[in-house]
Amino acid sequence: MIEFVKYLPKHVLSALKGLQRHMAMTISSVSAVSVTLLLMALFFVIAGNVENFTQHVEGDLKIHVAIDSIANQDAITAMEKEIAKMQDVAAVHFSSKEEELDALIKESGSVFQRYKDKNPMPNVFIVEVKEASKIPSVTKALNAIDGIEKAEYGGESIQHMIDTFSFIRSSGFIFVLALSLIALFLITNTIKMTIYTRNTELSIMRFVGANNAYIKTPFMMEGMCIGILGAILPIALMCIGYSTLYHMLNGYFLSSMFVMQPLYPFLLQLSAVLVGSGALVGVAGSFLATTKYLRWRR
Amino acid sequence: MILLKNVSKSYRNGVHALRDINLEVEDGEFVYIIGPTGCGKSTLIKILDGEELPDDGEVFVNGINVGKLRHAKVPLYRRNIGVIFQDFRLLPKMTVFENIAFALEVLAMEKTAIRRRVREVLELVDLQDKAKAFPEQLSGGQQQRATIGRAIANHPKVLIADEPTGNLDPEKSIEIIQLLDKINQVEKTTIVMVTHDEKLVNAYKKRTIALEEGFIVADIKKGGYIQHD
C-alpha cells in the first residue's frame, strides 16, 4: 500500500504519457465512450423528466368531495374525522362554499360575481390519497358515506396517464440499466483492444521484473482518463441542449402539467453520473483486460 | 550458479523439447548453447527465465527453484537475472533512456541513482548519444546494445541471451559478443548464450554445450563448434 502511494505520481505521469504516445487508440476509445455515454445521458434525461412529470401529476390528484347541503357543522366535523381515519387517505381539507365560489371567481372570471348573493356551490372536502392508484377505491368508499353528495376525481383519463407514466418510468429505468451494461461491455472491449495492441509491452514489463500491480496501475489510470475524457463531450452537449430546451419551453413540456426538471441540480447530477460511470467503466475495462492478459502470460 | 537436474519438458502437441537434461554452470562462466533449429535451445532459455515450467526435474538459478515459481513471483525472480532476446523487445513507446530506467524503476531505486546508473550503462554499451531516441530510430545493433544495457542495469548475477546476434550482420555480431565478453570480465556476470552462429562460436571460444532433439550431445570445455555428419 505504501509502495502504491509512493509510485502514484509516477503512475499518473506514465498513464498520461501512454495516452499521448498512443494517440490514435486514445481517440478511438474516447469516442466510443462518448457515444455510449451520450446515449445513456439521453435516456437519463428522459427518465428523469418522466419521473418528475409523474410526481407532479400524482401530487395534483385530489378527490373533490361535495357535501350534502343539509349537513350541519357537527355532521361535517364528524365526517371529516371519519374520512381522515380511512386507510389510504393522506389528508383532508375542508373548504366552505364561500371559499369554493371565491376560487371559481378567481379561476373563471368575474362573471361568477353575481352568484355572491345566492351561492350555488356546495361545501367540500379536498381529500388527498397516499398513492395515486388508490384513488378509485377511495372515491368509491367516499361515495358510500352518508351525507356526501358526490365524490369525484379527474376520471379515467387521468388514471390512464398515471399508468402510462409509471410504465414509461419503470421501463425507462430498465432501459438505462441495460444501456449502462451495454456501455460497460463496449468500453471494456475497446479498452481491451487498445491493451491487446500493447500486449508485447505488458510481457516486456514482466520480463524486466515489474510485478502485476505495477504493470496494471498505469493502464487502469489510462482507462480512467479515457472514461473521464469520454464523458466531457456528452456532458457539454447535454448541458447546452437541455438548458436551451428548458429556456425555450419555459420549463414546461407541451402543457403546464409537465414540469421539466429544473436545470440545477439535475444537470449537476447528470454530469456526476456520466463522469462517474465513465471513470468506473474505464478502470474496470482496463483491469479486466490487463488481468486477463497477464494471467496466461508467465 | 545454474543447476539443472533431470529436466524434461514436452509440449501439448507431443513435441519433446528437452529430455533428462543435467547441467551445471559455475558463477562467472560464459557458456554457449548450440544446436540445430528445434533442438530445444529456446525451451531451455524459457525454463531458465521462468517463462515455462519443466514437466520433470529441478531448475535452480542462484539458489532459487525456478521450476516451482508461482505466477506472481516470476517478475521478482527476473529482477535477479538479465534476459536478452533476438527480437530485442524494447518498449516501443519509450526512449532508450526510459527503457533502461524502467528496469531500475521497478526495483524502487532512487531517481538520482537511476539516472546515474543509466548513464553508466549507456556508456558501457556505447549509446550515450542515443539516450533520447526511440527504439525504431535505432539500427539493429544499436537496439541490441540497448537491450543488453537494460538487462545488465541492475547488476544481475546471470545473463541469459537468446540468439542475441540472430538478427545482426557478422560485423555487428562481433561487436555484441565483445560487449558480452566485457560484461563477463568486468561485472563477473554468468552468461548463458544460445546461438547457432558457427563463426562466432569458433572465433570466441568458450565452454560449448550442444543440444540435439532435446538431449545434451556434447559439453566441450575448451569450446568450438562441433561438426555434424
Image (spheres, coloured by chain):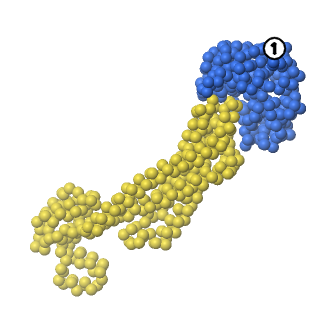
Q: Which quadrant holds residue A207?
A: top right
Q: Is residue B163 left or right of residue A261?
A: right
The N terminus of chain A is located in which quarter? Answer: top right
Q: What residue lies at 34% left-to-right and 62% top-to-bottom?
A: A164
Looking at the image, residue A180 sits to the left or right of residue A192; the answer is: left
Residue B200 at x, y = what percent?
A: 86, 25
Residue at image coords 18%, 75%:
A122
Picture coordinates of residue A239, whole percent (x, y) = 53, 63
* Residue A144 x/y as whole percent: 13, 64
Give me the chain that's yellow: A
Q: Residue furthest front?
A: B229
Q: Is residue B195 visible?
A: yes
Give the SS element for disc 1.
Answer: strand
Seen in the picture, residue B157 relative to A56 is either above or below; the reply is above
Q: Is residue A266 left or right of residue B148?
A: left
Label count reads: 1
Above or below — where is A15 with respect to B37? Answer: below
The x, y position of residue B15, in whole percent, is 64, 24
**On what subunit does the disc labeled 1 rest?**
B
**Residue situated in front as seen by the camera: B220 or A277:** B220
Q: Residues within 10 Å of mark 1 (few under 14, many from 20)?
A: some
Q: Quadrant of residue B25?
A: top right
Residue located at (45% from left, 54% from top): A176
Q: What amino acid type is highlighted by mark number 1?
A: Ile
Q: Colour of chain B?
A: blue
Which residue in the protein does label 1 denote? B220
Whether residue B3 is visible: no
Q: Quadrant of residue A197?
A: top right
Quadrant for the C terminus of chain A, please.
Answer: top right
Q: Looking at the picture, tell me which residue is in the foreground, A48 or B40.
A: B40
